[in-house]
Amino acid sequence: MTHEYPSILQCAVAATALKILLFPAYKSTDFEVHRNWLAITHSLPVKEWYYEKTSEWTLDYPPFFAYFEWVLSQAAALFHPEMLNLRALRYDSWQTVYFQRASVLITEGMLIYALHRYVKSSSPESRKASQATAVSILLSPGFLIIDHVHFQYNGFLYGILILSLVLARSRSTLLSSGLLFAILLCFKHIYLYLAPAYFVFLLRSYCLSPRSIWRIKFGNVIKLGTGILAICATAFGPFVYWGQLDQLVSRLFPFSRGLCHAYWAPNVWAIYSFVDRIMIHLAPYLRLSVDETAVQSVTRGLVGDTSFAVLPNIPPRVTFVLTLFFQTICLVRLFFRPTWETFVGAVTLCGYASFLFGWHVHEKAILLIIIPFSLLALKDRRYLGAFRPLAVAGHVSLFPLLFTAQEFPIKSVYTIFWLVLFLLTFDQLAPASTQPRVFLLDRFSLAYIAIAIPLIAYCSLVHALIFGQKRDFYKQKKFTCTITGHSGLSFFDALDSEMEGSREVNSLFPDALREPVLRKVQFSTISRIDELVNHVFEEFKHDFFPGEQVTALVGDGQKLEGTVREKAKFPELRRPDGSLQRKAFARYFVKLAEPSCDEALLDGVHLIRERKVFTKQMLRSFLKNTLTREAWSGAPWIVKERVAKDYRIPTEVPSELQYGARSAATKERVATKNAGAGDTFFDYLASQPRLPELKPAKGQKTKISLQEVAKFRQEK
């Protein structure tokens, strides 16, 4: 493709050979996610795609990615139809593995083509540097770890992004650049983080005159607006027509998730959480209040329950304001200086701001910074000085995605090799800066690299060889899944179990049941979770609530699907003598789905829930997911603060159930018991008058003779 050696095509062939060898490697739950999406798009009509929830891995990407999965499913049907069964959860036959791995490799051709266009569009004097940049992106450890082991399609999507950035280099292809980015947003909405930079750049360079910002190019505005509307209409139009836009938006933007993701992204909120953990220990000395219910929640962001014990909780609007504020700084510069380099820098910084301050940021989002910044890293040594620590820290932050022993050497050796090779190469190719560099920051960058790479090598390889399994704490099977209650798991198995259990509960547990169940258990003092589950299950198994999907038994045993529309409760009645005249009962108006959408008035005996949505195991998982309590005997169960706020459940613990009151009551009972125990047999004896002491008469011998003893024995 170019006259440079090695060419992009040669590197792609070598990289493909390595990636094929990794086909049998570890695969994350994202592998099952995409297999399930293949099954959804192949088995169901389009209007049911965003309602299907047989699996917890529901479709939550924009429509173009759903269409992309549909295209792949057509090939999958020819290769191995069994993988397209909606009911075949966690199906991973070797045919399925090879097909999905191969689909990532083939679609990565978009990345290869975009990098080829990038090199071709470079000036002759920068062609060598562009070639090195392109090869570094193609061989990036990020794509190897996330796409070809963990499993995703980032190579394909970042290929579209890079091609859009390349098209923005020329004024003649600015329109194509903007439309291509709009298409990318309809594939994956995470790129909305970069949209402000595109908006400002296209506004200034394409819609406004370069001579004056007050002269609007109406023709360009119409072309750009019409093109974007056409793309959005193609993607979202059918769902708007079917009245499914709200459902689609709820799938794309699940704000119920917590501030921090399960594998923490190294951003501001990770530091904030760390500071909160430190403050928990310092709080008694600084006389700070501690929210006991939040002490455990900041240790993970699995189920959207992240809250802080000492520091203030962070709502989504705060992350939005901070992100927008720091994005605005670079956008102002872009507006007044709309060059291609400034545009790529603004794209990078918009991604950086969203990564540092965004809500529920995935660790994989670091590629939003590394990939576009790579295109500027060799502009001069100032840019390279900022890129080096980012490349090291960013790629190492992806290591938790691969935690199995087999892949540990792969990620470590490959990442270290890539860092050493390309950072040394970039150091030789980056020209000197025409502007002065800050000496302290420049040397800090070098010191960071000099320490970080040997540290990575030691932690990844040498430490395990020296200490062996002595400190391999996380692999010990001594952890318990807090959602399912399964014990005897390694840390990572327990973590995966919690994530899967949380997703399953969130997707299957009936929405209509959540608030009544939570109100029932709020401040309950039943100590054992099993007893609490049994108590709640028995009370709710024949009780139904408006909005629930049920099966109604009507007529001669005919079963019809329906929805509880209204519930009428009738209290128990008692006779004047107090005897029971009538038990409490309820009646339900059920909207039947077919055949005529009539309503039926039924009791609880003639209604049935779907078997798997309300079981003791599901209820246990839901309660473990939403309840917490303090670590003292007799502490009441409390609904987690975020959940309680969603359902407007009071969270102020009654005074008689608070620790001080319960402790005082316990002490009073013990004191009363001890006081009552004082009137015992021994106290009775002590209170009686003492008998007179008997003494022998004066002069009488008290010594018994031997004859008297013998006579006494004979009488006995």
Image: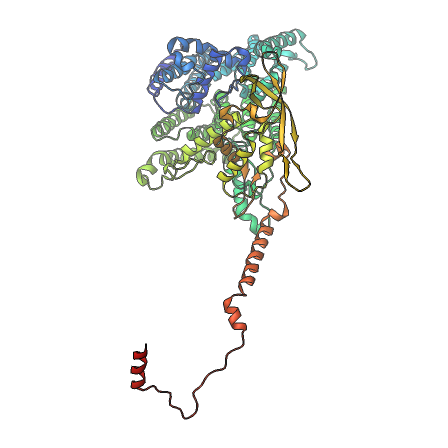
Residue sitting farthest toward the right: 214
Which quadrant does the C terminus fall into? bottom left
In this view, 366 is above or below 519: above
Residue sitting farthest toward the front: 715
Task: Indicate the quadrant where residue 541 lies.
Answer: top right
Task: Please state the total of marks drawn on the protein image.
Answer: 0
Instruction: Please state which of residues 411 and 639 is positioned toward the viewer in this rendering.
Output: 639
Which quadrant does the N terminus fall into? top left
**Where residue 154 sits in the image (x, y, percent)?**
46, 19
**Where residue 24 sits in the image (x, y, percent)?**
34, 21
How is this picture coloured? rainbow
Q: Residue at x 52, y 13 (%)?
A: 64
Instruction: Please state which of residues 531 and 414 is positioned toward the viewer in this rendering.
Output: 531
- Confirm whether residue 426 shows in the render: yes
Instruction: Please state which of residues 326 and 123 is positioned toward the viewer in this rendering.
Output: 326
- Confirm whether residue 272 shows in the render: no
- In the image, taking residue 127 as reference, residue 285 lies left or right, namely right
- In the image, taking residue 108 as reference, residue 229 lies left or right, namely right
Q: Residue at x 35, y 87 (%)?
A: 703
Residue sitting farthest toward the bottom: 699
In this view, 702 is above or below 52: below
**Where residue 464 sits in the image (x, y, percent)?**
33, 37
**Where residue 585 sits in the image (x, y, percent)?**
62, 31
Instruction: Please state which of residues 253 and 391 is positioned toward the viewer in this rendering.
Output: 253
